[in-house]
């Protein structure tokens, strides 16, 4: 699929609608796009390649866009294989092409492309350096740990386009039209969530540029209302809640904990919570649960004890929150146990290890199944988390 981005910039990427799991872990019901672009000027620059799942389609798109011309540069912004798998193919196909990349990316090349000779073909660029294609001048900005250490982004000074690498990306193939925010949020927190400080540093660099368009490596090109997209990235990377509300996240073995969690959600609604979402961690998509925890301002976790510890689906959820930098939230804990409750201790230990967390006290303990005497305690917890 070739699309005109500007008169000189063409989209040559490919949709992948057959993939089941992105990065072998994230469900992508609407697929994923591998975005690549080509800038046609006195000299020609290819902006990244694509995953090897779409090599043939991408090569065909590239040849069509080139119309018989030979590319001069391949700009490598990110070495992850879903964007860099075809560097070796391009180097072989175009023996004189120069590969423009960061010093860290140059170090990584041999790790991915054994036996490919890159001698005298690498142009290693530093912060703020430029490359002239003719009318277009490309300026490079380092973006380490957004979300790999070698990442850089590229600004086209002529058309005011920011090629943003994985920044501003989203799940979903381009052929499937859908609202941007939900799948962009799920993508951001599960892919880049740990690196909020580094995203903030990149946003500060971007603020110095006159950006009219953002071309990410996944998802649609962003042209209109850029302040909206940049504003969300600013909120997300500061770990601030996007909305006032409560996520009730539970894991239940035989239904007792589920009943208590559902009752808690109803109590919160009855007491005027702005928004309440509930997720079953044993069945619902984990990446969506993580996304919603970051989206809302408050969290209730409810889980049973298991093998003198914590039921694994809840442990997995809290582990995901830990590694993605979850912080700045108000949290309440409900544990269940039939003889020696241990879930609460484990959940509290994991939550207390996160930054700037306000944990509601006391924790609620359910013994096997919720009783009428437990309801006033849940109501008191609801009052405390909504206060």
Image: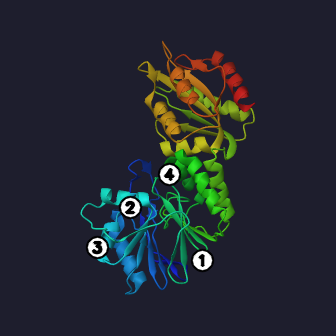
Question: In the figure, 209 relative to 316: above or below?
Answer: below
| For discs 3 and 2, the disc positioned in front in the rendered view | 2
x, y percent for residue 251: 50, 31
Q: Nearer the viewer, residue 82 or 138?
A: 138
The residue to which callout 2 is attached is: 106
Q: Are marks 4 and 1 in contact (CB under 8 Å)?
A: no
x, y percent for residue 273: 72, 37
x, y percent for residue 247: 61, 38
Mark 1 or mark 3: whose residue is earlier in sequence:
3
Mark 3 or mark 4: whose residue is earlier in sequence:
3
| For discs 2 and 1, the disc positioned in front in the rendered view | 2
Dot label at residue 92: 3
Q: Which residue lies at the image location 64% right of the left edge and 29% below the top edge?
A: 264
Mark 2 or mark 1: whose residue is earlier in sequence:
2
Dot label at residue 145: 4
The residue to which callout 1 is attached is: 159
Q: Nearer the viewer, residue 267 or 297?
A: 297
Question: In the figure, 323 relative to 259: above or below?
Answer: below
| For discs 2 and 4, the disc positioned in front in the rendered view | 2
Q: Are marks 2 and 1 in contact (CB under 8 Å)?
A: no
């Amino acid at each position: 699929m070739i699309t005109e981005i500007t008169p000189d910039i063409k989209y040559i990427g490919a949709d992948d609608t057959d993939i089941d799991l992105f990065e072998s872990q994230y469900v992508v019901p609407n697929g994923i796009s591998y975005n690549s672009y080509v800038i046609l000027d006195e000299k020609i620059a290819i902006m990244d390649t694509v995953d090897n799942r779409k090599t043939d389609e991408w090569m065909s798109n590239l040849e069509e866009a080139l119309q018989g011309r030979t590319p001069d540069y391949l700009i490598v912004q990110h070495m992850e294989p879903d964007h860099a798998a075809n560097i070796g193919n391009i180097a072989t196909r175009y023996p004189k092409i120069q590969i423009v990349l960061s010093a860290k990316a140059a170090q990584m090349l041999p790790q991915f492309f054994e036996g490919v000779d890159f001698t005298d073909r690498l142009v290693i660029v530093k912060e703020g350096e430029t490359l002239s294609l003719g009318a277009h001048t490309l300026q490079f900005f380092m973006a380490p740990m957004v979300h790999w250490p070698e990442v850089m982004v590229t600004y086209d000074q002529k058309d005011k386009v920011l090629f943003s690498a994985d920044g501003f990306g989203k799940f979903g193939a381009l052929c499937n039209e859908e609202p941007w925010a939900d799948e962009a949020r799920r993508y951001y927190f599960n892919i880049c969530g740990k690196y909020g400080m580094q995203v903030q540093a990149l946003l500060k660099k971007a603020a110095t540029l006159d950006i009219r368009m953002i071309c990410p490596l996944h998802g649609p090109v962003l042209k209109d209302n850029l302040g909206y997209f940049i504003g969300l990235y600013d909120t997300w990377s500061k770990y601030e809640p996007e909305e006032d509300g409560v996520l009730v996240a539970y894991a239940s073995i035989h239904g007792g904990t589920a009943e208590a969690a559902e009752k808690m959600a109803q109590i919160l609604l009855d007491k005027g919570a702005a928004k309440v979402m509930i997720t079953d961690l044993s069945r619902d998509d984990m990446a969506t649960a993580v996304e919603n925890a970051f989206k809302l301002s408050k969290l209730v976790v409810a889980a049973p004890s298991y093998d003198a510890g914590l039921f694994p689906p809840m442990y997995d959820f809290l582990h995901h929150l830990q590694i993605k930098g979850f912080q700045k939230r108000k949290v309440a804990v409900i544990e269940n146990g039939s003889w020696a409750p241990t879930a609460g201790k484990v959940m509290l230990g994991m939550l207390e290890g996160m930054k700037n967390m306000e944990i509601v006290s006391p924790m609620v303990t359910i013994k096997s199944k919720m009783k009428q005497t437990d309801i006033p305690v849940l109501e008191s917890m609801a009052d405390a988390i909504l206060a």
